[in-house]
Amino acid sequence: MIHEMLTVVPRRDDLIVAGDRRLSSDEVIDWADRASADLHPGQPTAFQLPTSPEGVIAYRACWRAGAVPVPLLYADSGRQRDHAFALLGLNQLFDPADHAAGDASPNPPAPTRPDDRALIMFTSGSSGVPKGVVHTQAAICYKVRQYIQVSGLTAADTVLFPASLAHVAGLLHSVLIPGAISMKTVLMARWDPGEALRLIEQERVTYMIGPPTFFNDLMDYPDFSPSRTASFRFLSIGGSSVTPAFVHRARDAFGCIVKRAYGSTEAPTVTTCTNGDDPERMANTDGRSFAPTQIRVDEHGEIQVFGPEVTVGYLDPAHTAAAFTEDGWFRTGDLGRIDADGYLTVIGRLGQKIIRGGENIDAIEAEAILESHPAVSQAVVLGEPDDRLGERVAAFVVADGPFDLDECRRWFAEAGAARFMTPERLIAIAEMPTMPSGKPDRADLAEKLRDPTR
């Protein structure tokens, strides 16, 4: 299944580029073969590696042996690792660097079935206990083939990926898709917008995916110019903080297709647009699903998904039971609306509602209004505890021009927003804290609300 998908494509000399390292497809396959020698079919195999060739090899070695990769966040200080080890009965990490050279004779590739476990990936939420998400061989193969088709990717494309390989986007775009179509992937172990611009020019990068953080950094970099990113064909932006204003700005700056996408560890990229869709659909919605994947919104406004890429469940059966409806649809925990043509717009999280004096406020909607202001590049809205109202609306903003509370009030009034939605406290910050996935770290910001000295 996955192993065969990654080894039948035409060979190339630069399948992986990372710093001064260039690995051909033959070198990647040979290294993965050697590294698989000590692994066993069905064995959960944990690794904790940076965004590097070693991270790619770890996945491929597992699939060759029929083992189950368990990628852990490289930035994790031990909490996720200890949790994974306890759940899976593990006591050591796998490192393919131990097999970078030598005469190891791997066993023949292990046969796999569509329903076999192919991945255990832990959610990277900012609070709560990490949940082990399980995907099958069939689910992973389906998602890869569908994304390649929807986005029209070929061996002529090149992707730049600077985020964690222990995130589902890193798995898809740094390991699976490049391996399946023999497409060059450029890895960055540490995000640096200046270095990213150099790599985009040098390697002729044709697309990137990720949260707005990366693209804001590129656009705001002192040496940025559209000529440096002229090789871009399209950008796919994910995360709850993507707004129409951001998409329009990025489209103007980069001069390429910019589209939103929606998915999660449990259900990767369930909606997006094709590159030929209406540009305004790309800016104002998170795209649509593609058959046989289906989406719906229940009576509470929660987005639910049914399709071949959806997880079969979590390591904890209790988590699985809570995550699925009686008729088998996955509950995303996200709020959204679907228009008459089937395009989805994510409007918030069930857990990101602010209740002020009995009025329900969607934090994502307030953030979209803030980010539509020309001076504001990023915003996160949270509920601040209040003895009288229950919660008040507080906003953290990254602004490159004058933007105070008076201007904020004026802007919300001009936007026609209800007064109860307007932030009552505004905190200007130089840089938005993020989780390893690149999403804003709301837990960290909530701590700042409780303790301003942090």
Image (cartoon, grey):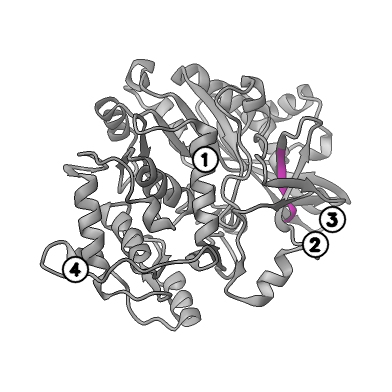
In space, the residues marked 4 and 3 are separated at their CA atoms by 60 Å
* Left or right side of 437 for 325: right
**Who is closer to the viewer here, 433 or 32?**
32
Tag of residue 98: 4
Q: Earlier in the sequence, mark 2 or mark 1?
A: 1
Q: Label 3's element?
A: loop
Residue at the location (51% across, 23% down)? 257
* Left or right side of 333 for 44: left
Please, what is the dominant secondary structure of the magenta stretch?
strand
Pointer 3 local density, CA inside 10 Å: few below 14, some 14–19, many at least 20? few
Q: Label 1's element?
A: helix
**Who is closer to the viewer here, 368 or 108?**
108
- Identify the residue position indicated by label 3 in the image: 388
In space, the residues marked 2 and 1 are separated at their CA atoms by 26 Å
Q: Earlier in the sequence, mark 4 or mark 3?
A: 4
Q: Earlier in the sequence, mark 3 or mark 2?
A: 2
**Of marks 4 and 3, the one in the foreground:** 4
Pointer 2 local density, CA inside 10 Å: few below 14, some 14–19, many at least 20? few
The image shows residue 173 at horizontal and vertical percentages of 42, 44
Range shown magenta: 345-350
Tag of residue 147: 1
Up/down of 291 relative to 225, above or below? below
| In the image, residue 422 lies in the stretch drawn in magenta | no
In space, the residues marked 3 and 2 are separated at their CA atoms by 42 Å
Q: Are marks 4 and 3 in contact (CB under 8 Å)?
A: no
| In the image, residue 346 lies in the stretch drawn in magenta | yes
